[in-house]
Image (cartoon, coloured by chain):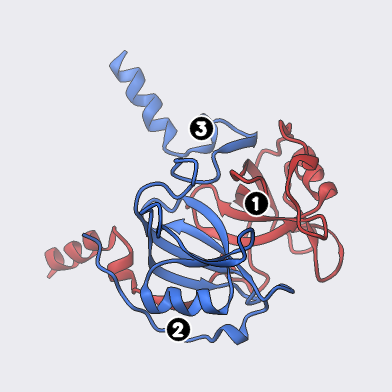
Chain colours: A red, B blue
Amino acid sequence: GIEVSSFEANIEFSEFKTDDQGLVPVVVQNYRTQEVLMVAYMNEEAYYKTIKTGKMTYYSRSRQELWVKGETSGHTQYLKSLDIDCDKDTLLAKVDQVGAACHTGSPTCFYTRISGETEATSNPLYVFKHLYDVIVD
Amino acid sequence: GIEVSSFEANIEFSEFKTDDQGLVPVVVQNYRTQEVLMVAYMNEEAYYKTIKTGKMTYYSRSRQELWVKGETSGHTQYLKSLDIDCDKDTLLAKVDQVGAACHTGSPTCFYTRISGETEATSNPLYVFKHLYDVIVD
């Protein structure tokens, strides 16, 4: 099982630069793979609840309510570390993700490629995969 | 030198769900290390300019103008891939970062730890570092 931890905040929410709805965006990253899973938003209550419980808790802008991630789906995100950026308006959470982060069942919400290189040129490890294929040949 | 590429967008900006200022947040990740470097914002012009030039271009909310990252600092970000999330309101860019992403000179804007575990428990590779120290001892 995953150990649930309680954390302490050394920065108060009031020090953050929030948007006009009192929210800050949170980039959520898988702490093992470093994959970016999603971006969600926190208000003051979500921030302190996350730190107290060790489970990622957001403010749902569409439902306009507190949202404990995984409360209904079981896809809980356990907090591993939390950082704030240089201008104090964005959080970065590294989490231990149970199941899929995305409500579609995808491991990450960022599964739609707009533009860019294929794995062959964007993944530095691809060369090893290619080398392996050559050796096998 | 870094090869500058031009890209094509298979999704138009008008399909995105922007905020009331016509902006979408962009999570910027180092394509080699997977480190999250910063979060910035794009308007329609910044989006198409980024794709056309292959250099990350944002809309500066504080200066209220287009901002070609690195234009004055030299710390250009070359686009490697661009993804949109499931509800089309957030972009994820993987980039080849020249120099430091943060204006403070830090490699990432997320250098302030609020809460969480130390490297010893949050970095899965730490055990190897520890093992090495034991062997050296």
- The Cα–Cα distance between marks 2 and 1, rounded to whole angstroms, is 27 Å
- Residue type pointed to by label 1: Thr
Q: Is residue A135 above or below residue B11?
A: above
Residue in view at x 73 percent, y 49 percent: A17
- Residue type pointed to by label 2: Ala
Chain letter, disc 3 residue: B
* Horizontal side, residue B32 vs residue B113: left or right: left
Check the picture and name the quadrant holding the N terminus of chain A: top right
- Residue type pointed to by label 3: Glu
Residue in view at x 33 percent, y 70 percent: A119
Q: Is residue B27 above or below residue A84?
A: below
Q: Reading the chain from its start, which is encountered first: label 2 or label 3?
A: 2
Q: Position of residue B117 (x, y in %)?
A: 60, 33
Taking the view exactly as shown, the residue that stands out farthest to the right is: A65
Q: Which residue is mark 2?
A: B9
Q: Are marks 2 and 1 in contact (CB under 8 Å)?
A: no
Residue B11, label in figure: none
Q: Are marks 1 and 3 on the same chain?
A: no
Chain letter, disc 1 residue: A
* Horizontal side, residue B8 vs residue B90: left or right: left
Q: Which residue is mark 3?
A: B119
> How busy is the neighbourhood of tag 2: few (under 14 within 10 Å), some, or many (20 plus)?
some
Q: From the image, state whether disc 1 or disc 3 is nearer to you.
A: 1
- Secondary structure beneath dot 2 equals loop
Q: Position of residue B125 (x, y in %)?
A: 41, 38
Q: Position of residue A65 (x, y in %)?
A: 87, 62
The image quarter containing residue A48 is: top right
> How busy is the neighbourhood of tag 3: few (under 14 within 10 Å), some, or many (20 plus)?
few
Taking the view exactly as shown, the residue that stands out farthest to the top is: B137
- Secondary structure beneath dot 1 equals loop
**In front of the other: B101 or A4:** B101
Residue A90, label in figure: 1
